[in-house]
Amino acid sequence: MVKQSGNLLVVDDNKAVLEAVRLLLRPFFTEVVALNSPVTLPEQLRAKAWRVVLLDMNFKAGINSGGEGLYWLHRIKEMCPELPVVLFTAYADIDLAVRGIKEGAADFVVKPYDNQKLVDTLLAAAEAKSAGKTVAPKPSSRSTHTMYWGESPAMQSLRQLVEKVAKTEANVLITGENGTGKELLARAIHAGSTHSDKALVTVDMGALTESLFESELFGHVKGAFTDAHADRTGKFVAANGSTLFLDEIGNLPYHLQAKLLTALQSRSVTPVGGNHPIPIQVRLITATNRDLQKMVAEGSFREDLLYRINTIHLHLPALRERKEDIVPLALRFMAHFSEHYEKPLPRLSEAAARRLQELPWAGNIRELEHVIEKAIILNEADELTEEFLPVPAPIAPASTLHEEQTITLEAMEIQLIRRTIRQCEGNLSAVAAQLGITRQTLYNKMKRYGL
């Protein structure tokens, strides 16, 4: 049964939002009172003591300055200085919400809102008041290093599945294109597990050389080979009693897959040069941007290993498949990079918001992050406009590289990298090998060109 946290006062002039919020929050508060106008706020504050207030930033039709929200925030604080107020704001008013926090608000939630984020923020504010503490915004409210679920149906279904899976010990395979946030999803699963108090151990299988595979995963003893000057603990032992995340599992060479399978089946590892197996108990999460079923059919991935790692399969949709989440994600990055570069947080213009939703985002969330970072660095105005964003354009067919036309070397390089990524089905190790460059050089070029 959900523990309820006192009474809640919600003030918003959108009746549909009020009803949705009331139904969402009713299980978490003993009483939820909804007002579609702030005019009666003083009367409500005098009538009884409240645990927390959720206050919209704008009320008058056609006015989106956020000034009314700040005005009523000040009125609430005058009457009830200790009452936590969470601001409910549209994406264009985040800078005002940040100002509101400086002027006494507990936190803010951006519309369109994430249900769990709204619940968590209000409960945190209520609990802080109960404990007599000052409420501070959670770092995750603007952090780019936590999972953003958004409002798309695909992501909400994924979230529900993760909530069921996280508390189990089932092995999980995460699939999705590059840049969709597979590592963040792995961290979210670990955070919801029974051993979240222990560290998540990660290994990038794409960056792991064959010669170091066993030493890195299973460890080695002193003197096992020329440079083994001391014992080394492998990743499996380091993750014992916790979660081991193997990223880019599809890049593991076929002849090494058997060694990984043996460790998983026997639940033990033997360090290189050692004689005694070490028992292990790890929860395994793997991720890939490749089609492992296709690789099994082609004979490049072991079917028995796929069954072992694929107890639960979670697929992250591409950003172009969740367009309703693009602008909220962009706003998160704007807030993060404005703070990182110590610059004022600009508004996002409507034209820029439309441009963001028109772009194809082949590089998914990672590409969006790089685009917003560059825009924040270059922008000096109080509004971020579309001039700082890429122009939507169809990808030129490969044949255009051979046509007689004027084209810059940079444009040719962009086309070549894009075409190679498509040919290699997003496998960046294969892309780098085919282009004759290192993975780090490829990453640098992708970041530079916003790919």
Image (tube, helix red, strand yellow):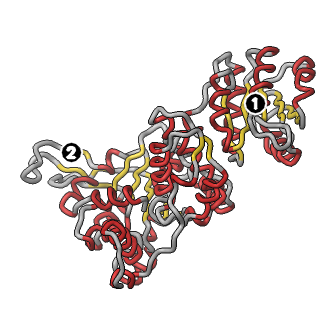
View extreme (left): residue: 226
Specify the label residue 67 is tagged with.
1
In the rendered image, the quadrant that contains the N terminus is top right
- Name the residue: 80% across, 20% down: 76
Query: Considering depth in this image, is 427 or 303 the residue closer to the camera?
Result: 427
In the rendered image, the quadrant that contains the C terminus is bottom left
View extreme (front): residue: 406
Q: Residue 441: percent from the left, percent from the top?
A: 27, 59
Horizontal arrangement in the rendering, residue 10 relative to residue 376 (left or right) = right
Query: Considering depth in this image, is 285 or 135 the residue closer to the camera?
Result: 135
- Name the residue: 46% across, 55% down: 366
Q: Amino acid at mark 1?
A: Gly
The residue singled out by tag 2 in the image is 232
- Name the element at disc 1: helix
- Name the residue: 62% across, 46% down: 348
Q: Is residue 304 visible?
A: no
Horizontal arrangement in the rendering, residue 262 relative to residue 197 (left or right) = left
